[in-house]
């Protein structure tokens, strides 16, 4: 059953990424059609939580690699080119976003880089989705296709559909966070994107049985009921979004679009489970050994609450409408005058380097031993011992830094202040 837990973690992480980073990408694409003032405003809105939103795709990749290595080995070679394009686009997007935010004013080049990279990342993700749904060529769990097998009519339609979904999420998010759009324009843009999403969803759904080599099993009553419940939830959420665009409360369209997206993901899962990679690679066939599953579920499962907490904290801190921040000069750094007697001796520096070297070795040792523990060996140390060892190393590191802080080692030297 642990392999299904890993599969659920992959789906949850991907779903969170599509819902959260989807509106980021959508806002970036919408900025291409906006004026200079709006482009900077959009980038500042995205800058509040984009790094936390993208962390979900990292979690999904880690769980897929460690928990379902058979699927990872088949999917990755089949989508090398669009996947590399997506990673490059995400890097350039972050570069444009941060440089625009730090520029202190509107910079056309950075703004266009942010918007263009957002569009490229969305297109590449859609191509990857289409390639996975159509099933990579494989024999005995090994990819046997070519470098451009990911390119097909269905994958292009998937890319177009994902771009429209992200644009819809971005428009809904902008209604909640900005005052710039008039109500009639918000209603017109949101409903147009919602109608395009519905049309593409129907087209992709009708073409899926012919594009996917897997035989859909809607004849199963339980599967059919769950699928049509997901469809009904998506339709209901779409209706709420339709009437919510251009009307208050402003958060309602985004909540409806997020619900609609999550329902679509669940409906797709209901159609395919337990197959992970079409046409017939199931969760059991592509899963890693039980010990790896246990280590993965515990490790990633413990990380999930922290990532969620960060998302919630960012959302709560930046709730409400966006307002242009007032720039204030940073206060000067605190300088602590030192006398020659108070200067740390050379032996103190040597001791600090030695202490940190030992702590790094202890951390590596804890990692190595944890692999044996969760691999079923545990000859020298058990799980509790690994936890105690890692916790002791971390506590010693923090205690050393606090001692250095009290000694003034982290303060600016007084001589620097006198020369400034």
Image (cartoon, grey):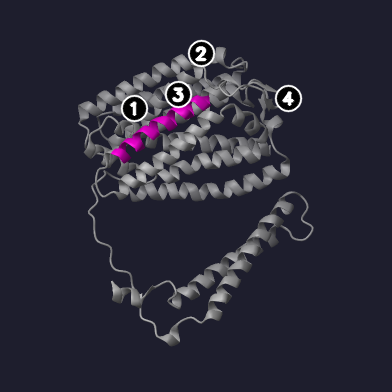
Disc 1 or disc 3, which is closer to the eye? 3
Q: Which residue in the structure is indicated by mark 4?
A: 140
Q: Secondary structure at mark 1?
A: helix
Q: CA distance from mark 3 to mark 4?
A: 29 Å
Left or right for 19, reference 277: left
The answer to whether residue 387 is magenta is no
Determine the main secondary structure of the stretch shown in magenta. Answer: helix
Mark 2–mark 4 CB contact (< 8 Å): no
Residue shown at the point (39%, 21%) measured from the top left: 197
Q: Position of residue 257 (x, y in %)?
A: 38, 30
Q: Which residue in the structure is indicated by mark 1?
A: 241
The answer to which of marks 1 and 2 sits earlier in the sequence is 2
Quadrant in the rendering for residue 297: top right
The answer to which of marks 3 and 4 sits earlier in the sequence is 4
For the residue pair 122 and 178, the one nearer the viewer reads as 122
The answer to which of marks 1 and 3 sits earlier in the sequence is 3
For the residue pair 365 and 9, the one nearer the viewer reads as 365
């Amino acid at each position: 059953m642990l392999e299904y837990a890993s599969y659920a973690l992959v789906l949850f992480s991907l779903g969170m990424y599509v819902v959260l980073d989807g509106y980021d990408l959508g806002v970036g694409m919408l900025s291409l059609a906006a004026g200079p003032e709006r482009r900077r405003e959009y980038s500042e809105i995205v800058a509040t939580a984009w790094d936390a939103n993208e962390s979900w795709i990292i979690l999904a990749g880690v769980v897929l690699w460690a928990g379902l290595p058979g699927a990872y080995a088949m999917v990755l070679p089949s989508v090398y080119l669009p996947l590399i394009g997506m990673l490059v686009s995400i890097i350039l997007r972050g570069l444009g976003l941060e440089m625009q935010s730090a520029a202190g004013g509107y910079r056309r080049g950075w703004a266009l880089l942010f918007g263009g990279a957002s569009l490229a990342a969305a297109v590449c993700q859609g191509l990857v989705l289409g390639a996975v749904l159509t099933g990579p060529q494989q024999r005995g769990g090994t990819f046997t296709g070519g470098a451009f097998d990911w390119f097909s009519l269905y994958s292009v339609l998937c890319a177009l559909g994902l771009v429209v979904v992200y644009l819809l999420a971005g428009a809904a998010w902008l209604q909640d966070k900005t005052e710039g759009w008039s109500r009639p324009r918000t209603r017109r843009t949101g409903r147009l994107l919602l109608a395009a999403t519905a049309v593409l969803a129907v087209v992709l759904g009708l073409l899926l049985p012919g594009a996917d080599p897997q035989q859909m099993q809607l004849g199963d009553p339980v599967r059919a009921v769950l699928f049509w419940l997901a469809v009904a939830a998506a339709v209901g959420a779409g209706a709420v979004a339709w009437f919510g665009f251009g009307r208050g409360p402003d958060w309602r369209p985004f909540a409806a679009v997020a619900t609609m997206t999550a329902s679509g993901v669940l409906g797709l899962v209901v159609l395919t489970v337990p197959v992970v990679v079409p046409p017939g690679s199931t969760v059991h066939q592509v899963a890693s050994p039980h010990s790896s599953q246990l280590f993965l579920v515990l490790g990633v499962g413990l990380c999930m609450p922290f990532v969620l907490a960060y998302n919630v904290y960012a959302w709560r801190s930046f709730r409400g409408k966006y307002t242009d921040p007032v720039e204030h000069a940073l206060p000067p750094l605190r300088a602590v005058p030192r006398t020659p007697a108070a200067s740390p001796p050379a032996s103190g520096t040597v001791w600090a380097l030695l202490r940190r070297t030992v702590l790094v070795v202890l951390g590596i040792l804890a990692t190595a031993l944890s692999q044996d523990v969760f691999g079923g060996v545990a000859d020298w140390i058990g799980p509790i011992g690994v936890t105690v060892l890692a916790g002791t190393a971390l506590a010693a590191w923090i205690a050393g830094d606090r001692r250095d802080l009290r000694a003034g080692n982290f303060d600016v030297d007084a001589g620097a202040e006198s020369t400034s």
